[in-house]
Image: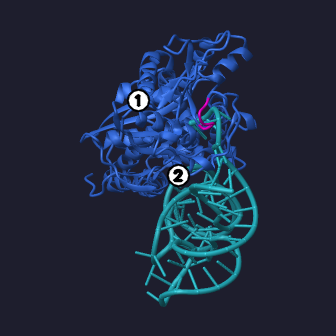
Amino acid sequence: MASVNKLCLYDTASRQVSEFRPLKPGQASIYLCGATVQASPHVGHIRSGINFDILRRWLIASGYRVTFIRNVTDIDDKIIHNAGHEDIPWWELAMKYERSFNDAYRALNVMAPTYEPRATGHMTQMIELIKRLVEKGSAYAPGNGDVYLEVRKLKSYLTLSSQKLDDLLLTKDGEEKFKRDPRDFALWKGAKEGEPSWPTPWGNGRPGWHIECSAMALAYLGQEFDIHGGGLDLIFPHHENEIAQSEAAGYKFARLWMHNAWVTTSGEKMGKSLGNSLQVDEVLKRVRGIELRWYLSSAHYRSMLEFSFEALDEAAVAFRRIENFLYRAREALATTPEIVISDELSDALDDDLAVPQVLAQISEWLKLGNNGLSSLDKAQVAEYSSYIRAALSILGTDPFDPAYSSPSSADLSGAVDGLISLLLEQRSAARARKDFAAADQIRDQISAMGISIEDRADGVRWSING
RNA sequence: GGUGGAGUGGCCGAGAGGCGAGGCUCGGGACUGCAAAUCCCGCUACACGGGUUCAAAUCCCGUCUCCACCUCCA
């Protein structure tokens, strides 16, 4: 259990893996950029949730008290645009997709955050932060209702993405005549006719895209916190701008930046505009949540995951093997395997969450555990099933986790067990008198009901086909 | 133009100077009345061209290909 290693994580800012040193010993504060609730989640969105859920579970298992903030951005350009398109109010659209994200998180066993602040609930904090930036001379309100951050004045702008201000390609946004520099970005946007707005000293308006994260991180995690996470595509501009705002306001902000890679199809990033996005609820018609989670967890969080249904199916089959072993182990032991964190698991996860290494280890344990089942060696079964269960619990795919239980099937299983057992007794009798034709006929009939039979060393076992 | 990432066996997918990660598929075997499940054995790969080194998938130089970000992005 005790590992000599310490948790090491890759930091986007330093581009290095180094030891995680929390601000307060034994505590970890994490801010994850969550959903902008403008459409249903696709598997890429949920991969991000899963990757950081694994981080969180590992920190908790390592003894940390984790404060995990994952925001919901429920007001932005796209939400207003899409609401017009669907012909419903912007707040109805935002709530609709927030629920859809929550359904996906729940189906994939992503732990609920410690707190989940919504942008619309933090206008006061955002306006206060912008006021502070204006007072410090870092931001300016040119009188069109917008407030911009003056990026040239910042000494460390673009250090996260290691770019130079003058190398950025410029895109026209129609606000050039108000901006002191075309690269300045909007902290606050003046309201156009018919748009939602909130009153401010600079007129009615709504937040720019980035300010909510700075304001909410400050509100719940304070001026400095341990880890800020999100997808790779948030490095620029979103996270750069969060840093810019927060540091200009005098706050230290995040100590460590972690970014997950995308889910791709045909080598390309998943996105609505490409028409290649796979919605979570669609994929869940094909495999169970626990299997989808296993698949999305299987690549290292910093590696692209090339999505294919073939790979998904393969992952699901592989997972069922592990799951079946755990169920057999529970039967053999007459108790649910305990969660025992092995050194191998600790070492792998401490090394920047090396999940693929964990999977390789699980394969080894699975062989040893299955050997234990064949030789009826309970101690061996207990040992390896415990290691496997511990690994699965950190990955969020522990089949014994109540989050995955379906109560209705549990009620039925007793009755089904009785019925199947009756048939199996008949088959055993037929086999005993070497009437294999009759025995196979019974097996075929049971099989036709979607139930498979295994003749094992310790008796006959049946299971419902997944 | 700038910045970052990737190319590994039939497929997926780790590793980052020295014992062939692991999985899937495929072939062989054990067990079994036959299956199923499980286990055992086999299948010596790192885009290309140079270089450094006793030793390179890993380091250096060059080349090719692909992907991403540059104010909508997980």
Task: Please tell me whether residue A182 belongs to the stretch shown in magenta.
Answer: yes
Task: Please tell me whether residue A105 belongs to the stretch shown in magenta.
Answer: no
Query: Residue A162, labelled with which disc?
Result: 2
Q: CA distance from mark 1 to mark 2?
A: 26 Å
On the question of residue A104 being in view, the answer is no
Q: Which chain is blue?
A: A
In front: A275, or A409?
A275
Mark 1 neighbour density, 10 Å: few (under 14) some (14–19) many (20 or more): few
Amino acid type shown at disc 1:
Lys
Pointer 1: what residue? A136
The residue lying at 63 percent from left, 27 percent from top is A178
Q: Earlier in the sequence, mark 1 or mark 2?
A: 1
Q: Secondary structure at mark 1?
A: loop
Q: Quadrant of residue A313?
A: top right
In front: A384, or A457?
A384
Amino acid type shown at disc 2:
Ser
